Image (cartoon, rainbow, N blue to C red):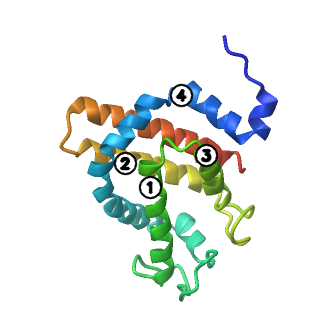
Amino acid sequence: METIDETRLESDLEYRYQYLCRFVGFGPDDIVAIQEIAPHLGPSIPALVEQTYTRLLAFDATARHFLPRPSGFTGTAAASLSAMSLADPQIQFRREHLMRYLMHLLGHASDAKLFQYFDMVGKIHTPAAGNREVSVPLVQMNALMGLLSDLLLGAIADLPLEPGDRLRASRAFLKLLWIQNDFVMRQY
């Protein structure tokens, strides 16, 4: 039985990340599965982002979080929820961020500092980083992570690969997204 310093889990991000990887079984084989599928899944990322934002804008509880101006955005923002659409410059700006996030997962699953990136992703959805007006409730973040999981698994299932390769990649992404979700939840 491995001994875990539970106090350290709360204070040492790398220790937390390594523990989560060991616990859920995210290891070198999962990294390889993600890297091998990247050339096949990468072209699907724009469609996944569009599906994600279509869903996010379909509910007022999620769409309302796109009204405050995000850090780094200098364009014109929608004046109201009813005026907001996928074509708005502010939504395009946010879509680009999600696209970079998903591409980061594909290209950096082996990055030793991935835990820092995951922690930053959690923080930017709270007043702890970025725009102080952005405070996405945990229920909405969990909904988003669940949606991303489903969309990624669906995209992987549709790839013209051997069933075993699809299964390995699906399991690897699920593990990685659960680890990400923990780094989101720790911000709350």
Query: Alpha carbon of mark 3 to alpha carbon of mark 2: how far?
Result: 23 Å
Instruction: Give the residue displayed 22% in from the left and 32% down from the top.
Output: 163
Establish if 188 lies above or below 69: above
Query: Alpha carbon of mark 2 to alpha carbon of mark 4: how far?
Result: 19 Å
Query: Alpha carbon of mark 1 to alpha carbon of mark 3: how far?
Result: 16 Å
Can residue 37 be seen by looking at this rendering?
yes
Label 1 vs 3, first from the N-terminus: 1
Amino acid type at image mark 3: Lys
Q: Nearer the viewer, residue 73 or 60?
A: 73
- Between disc 3 and disc 2, the foreground one is 3
Label 3 vs 4, first from the N-terminus: 4
In contact (CB < 8 Å): disc 3 and disc 4: no
Amino acid type at image mark 2: Leu
- Disc 4 crowd rating (10 Å Cα; few below 14, some 14-19, many 20+) is some
Provide residue 12's location: percent of width, then percent of height. Answer: 75, 39
Residue 121 is drawn in which quadrant?
A: bottom right
Q: Which residue is mark 2?
A: 152
Q: Secondary structure at mark 3?
A: loop
Query: Alpha carbon of mark 3 to alpha carbon of mark 4: how far?
Result: 18 Å
Instruction: Give the residue displayed 27% in from the left and 33% down from the top.
Output: 165
In contact (CB < 8 Å): disc 1 and disc 3: no
- Between disc 1 and disc 3, the foreground one is 3
Asked if residue 144 lies left or right of residue 163, the reply is right
Label 1 vs 4, first from the N-terminus: 4
In contact (CB < 8 Å): disc 2 and disc 1: yes
Q: Which residue is mark 4?
A: 24
Q: Which residue is mark 3?
A: 113
Asked if residue 4 lies left or right of residue 19, the reply is right
The circle drawn on residue 102 is 1
- Disc 1 crowd rating (10 Å Cα; few below 14, some 14-19, many 20+) is some
In contact (CB < 8 Å): disc 3 and disc 2: no
Establish if 75 lies above or below 8: below
